Image: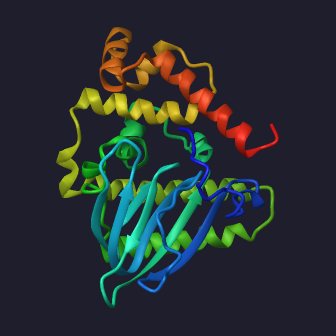
Amino acid sequence: MFIPRNCMTSYRYKLYTTALPIRIMHYRHDGSDINLKYHAHEFMELVVVTGGQATHCVNIPGESPISYPIRRGSVFLINMGESHTYQFDKGQSLVIDNILFDQEVMNYFQFKTPEEMQFMDFIYLLPQLPPEIRFLSAPHLDELLMKRLDDLIRLLEAQEKEENSGNGTVRLLLLSLIVALISQQYAQNDAYHLMPAKSKANILRLISYLQQHFSENLSLDELARIAMCSRRSLTRLFREITGETVIHYIQRLRLAKVCNLLRGSRK
């Protein structure tokens, strides 16, 4: 994905001050926050609403804008390049924990078999769905799960300040646990029936996988295994869903990465 110039950068949020680009941020917003405008990021943003309520407004390129209410327990993932903001009725406010992480962190998640990827649908499938389905079926955590999630977030935040050789591994494991906990709730969500047919869902999971692993030497046989179909079915289904071949899609991802590096780095 090509990231627009007005995106909030990873460097602004100091994602690279540690070996693993993950950072915890805490915010309280209300209607008096005049600087709260539509904004996008060049990183992933996992948002956990810990208090208050508001309207979440999302504007994704090529899709119709969507607005929906959020409150304590709401959890959602904003992809790179997607614009969003919050709107408030009189007297409303919002308290959130933001987990910011570079998309390449997902390369290290040890979820690569089809079964494991299906268990992690919150990050492998949900981000690929149309906004009206994606945000409607987003998980809502009860108080017990919120307490567990809060404990993990506090541990992850504490690890930001540690400097030792195993710090990156611990932080990655904590982020994996956070995502797994949310994904488990997502699979039990009442709106989970909005998921697409199995064959299409498998291709959408594969697309998420490609977005993280496009720099690797990937064979069609391996990709067909991940999509749980034959090479012939992979070729047909992938073109039906994306309008292009698997090879062209990977090439486009690589070119977009090059464009972002040329624009935002010295490489």
The residue sitting at 28% across, 29% down in the picture is 200
Q: Is residue 248 visible?
A: yes
Q: In this view, does 137 lie to the left or right of 4?
A: left
Q: Where residue 106 sits in the image (x, y, percent)?
A: 56, 44
Location of residue 220 with respect to 265 vertically, above or below: above
Residue 167 quadrant: bottom right
Residue that protrudes farthest toward the top in the picture: 232
**Quadrant where the C terminus lies?**
top right
24 or 150: nearer the eye? 24
Q: In this view, does 110 lie to the left or right of 17?
A: left
Q: Where residue 61 sits in the image (x, y, percent)?
A: 41, 45
89 or 26: nearer the eye? 89
Q: Can residue 222 be seen in this view?
A: no
Location of residue 52 with respect to 234 vertically, above or below: below
Q: Where residue 10 sits in the image (x, y, percent)?
A: 67, 56
Location of residue 17 with respect to 5 vertically, above or below: below
Location of residue 246 with respect to 203 vertically, above or below: above
The residue sitting at 27% across, 65% down in the picture is 68
Q: Where residue 172 sits in the image (x, y, percent)?
A: 61, 54
